Image (cartoon, helix red, strand yellow):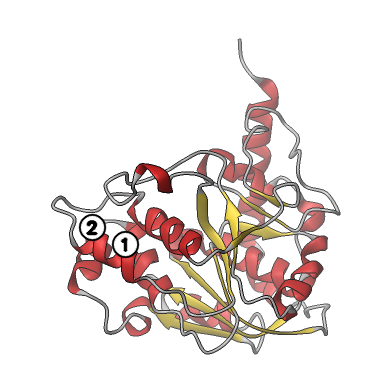
Amino acid sequence: MVNIGYRLARLQGKITRSLYQKQMRRIIRRPIQQEKRLEVAIYSLSCPRDLPEQIASICSFLNYAGIPEQFTVISDGYSDRECQLLKNLHPCIVVISLSEFTRGLPQKVYEYAAINPMGKKLAAILSIPGDRVSIYTDSDIFFFPQAKELESLIQTADPHSYYLPDIDPAFDLRILQESERENPINGGFILFKKKANWDLAMERFLNLQEPPNYFTEQTMMHLTLHREKSKPLPKDRYIMSRDDEFIFRDRYATEETVLRHYVTPVRHKFWCNPQYLV
């Protein structure tokens, strides 16, 4: 039986994304309706394929959460024209190439980056400075009106970092002991309160006898953040669920949602809520 709701949602997402892409220059010229300043640095890695999502993600953060001290887009291949589009969004936007941003890492990390996009993400996250509160966010994360609550997490004196809980384990089991596999972490959104200590994860990574795989980066994140007693973000407002994949409606697009990570199976739903596109 044909799932009409699913097909319509995918069609809606495709059409909305196409229209958004055609109007990006006009969208970029719209003023950001936000004055609240946040004492945080934001980092996001993306490539030309994801430019519409990256722009929509940034706009949703700026409008709903606030203006960070700096929003750094780590460019994996953006042209000069695309870099300028991103920088035109707001004065807080900085665009830097991945090769410039990632310096002084072990050679095996660069080899991982050369064979797998998750290796590029690992290199980017490892290179985030630890001199202030920072957030790493994937370009396919959309922020909703309740993202204003991020301000309290950023300002709290609590020294622990915060992570987005995953719904299913997605591990490179060569890096984890059996006792370390509970409460899986998704690497799409992390609020770092301090510089993470990657020593154990890096030791295990460097000792791998076979090449790292798609889940190696997230596994290293999982191991590191749990060792540092990082805290999970509430699952009912920081959404990783994809249980609405095969229905038309985006079950989690509400005024009470902080953010949603639109992973590949539900990527089309990123574009199914035009009322929140700002």
Q: Is residue 110 left or right of residue 169?
A: left
Q: Is residue 221 above or below residue 274?
A: below
Pointers 1 and 2 in contact (CB under 8 A)? yes
What is the three-letter code of the residue carrying label 2?
Ile
Taking the image as drawn, is residue 112 in sight? no
Residue drawn at the location 29% of the way across and 67% of the way down: 202
What is the three-letter code of the residue carrying label 1?
Gly
- Residue 55 point in image, percent of width and height: 61, 68
- Residue 159 point in image, percent of width and height: 62, 77
- Residue 36 point in image, percent of width and height: 81, 83
- Residue 260 point in image, percent of width and height: 67, 52
Label 1 vs label 2: CA separation? 7 Å
In this view of the protein, which residue sits in the foreground, 264 or 210?
A: 210
In this view of the protein, which residue sits in the foreground, 223 or 14?
A: 223
Q: Which residue is mark 2?
A: 115
Q: Is residue 129 above or below residue 165?
A: below
Say what secondary structure mark 1 lies in.
helix
Q: Quadrant of the N terminus?
A: top right
Instruction: Give the quadrant of residue 134.
Output: bottom right
Q: Is residue 237 left or right of residue 173?
A: right
Q: Which residue is mark 1?
A: 119
Q: Nearer the viewer, mark 1 or mark 2?
A: 1
Residue drawn at the location 59% of the way across and 40% of the way down: 266
Residue drawn at the location 70% of the way across and 25% of the way down: 5
Say what secondary structure mark 2 lies in.
helix
Taking the image as drawn, is residue 183 in sight? yes
